Image (cartoon, rainbow, N blue to C red):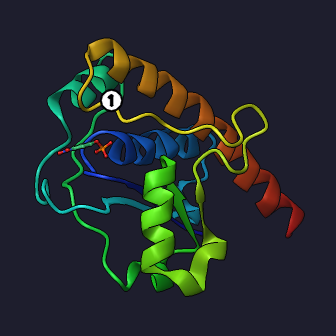
Amino acid sequence: MKVLFVCLGNICRSPLAEALFLHHLDVRSLKAHFEIDSCGTGNWHAGELPDPRTIKSAKKNGIEMNHRARQINPSDIHHYDYLFAMDHSNLENLHTMFPEHTDKIVLLTHYSDKYKGQIIPDPYFGDEEGFDAVFNLLNDVNEELVLFFADKQQASK
Ligand code: 4NP
């Protein structure tokens, strides 16, 4: 299964979503079944490490981050099985870029019972508390998402 997490700048939400999804896969020994990455719809931060506030929030919860930001590219839509957008703006940008493939582009919360339809708010112009809130939300949503994929995999056996 190939999964791509997408936000605007690829320095706050999507690299953290990627790191937390990987963490929850690791906890359940499911890493080998997945290929995951993250990217942004914009290119302003290409090549940069995550925002220092994201790194700090992750680190105090035991999550290390070393992702380098990159912009989405046209081949991603063919390579990945799922593209997870953090908010409606990301979703609309992706649907506009890949109008033939909207079936595999959904909000991150799409398969969640608890958070379906909710967005992951952009913390960039806020304070550290906002970054911690995004951490907690992404952690919860992605644990549920890993369980969703684990069930799906079990059902297909
Ligand atoms: P992200 O947050 O999309 O979660 O990585 C942002 C990062 C940078 C900017 C906006 C949002 N920016 O305007 O540069």
Q: Position of residue 68 (x, y in %)?
A: 18, 54
Residue 133, compared with residue 26, is above or below; it is: above
Of helix, strand and loop, which one carries label 1? loop
Q: Position of residue 135 (x, y in %)?
A: 43, 26
Ligand 1 within 8 Å of disc 1? The answer is yes
Image quarter where the C terminus lies is bottom right
In this rendering, would 15 be left or right of 77? left
In this rendering, would 78 be left or right of 19? right
Foreground pick, 53 / 103: 103
Q: Quadrant of residue 44?
A: bottom left
Name the residue at 64% across, 44% down.
Answer: 109
In this rendering, would 35 be left or right of 140? left
Name the residue at 68% across, 50% down.
Answer: 110
Asked whether residue 20 appears in the rendered view, the answer is: yes
Q: Quadrant of residue 66?
A: top left
Quadrant in which ligand 1 is drawn: top left
Residue 54, compared with residue 84, is above or below; it is: above
Name the residue at 33% across, 26% down.
Answer: 58
Asked whether residue 61 appears in the rendered view, the answer is: no
For label 1, the residue is 123
Q: Which three-letter amino acid code belongs to the residue tagged 1?
A: Pro
Q: Position of residue 95 (x, y in %)?
A: 51, 72
- The residue positioned farthest toward the top in the image shown: 129
In this rendering, would 98 be left or right of 47? right
Name the residue at 43% across, 56% down.
Answer: 90
Residue 66, compared with residue 156, is above or below; it is: above
Residue 133, compared with residue 1, is above or below; it is: above
Q: Quadrant of residue 123?
A: top left
Foreground pick, 71 / 31: 71
Image quarter where the N terminus lies is bottom right
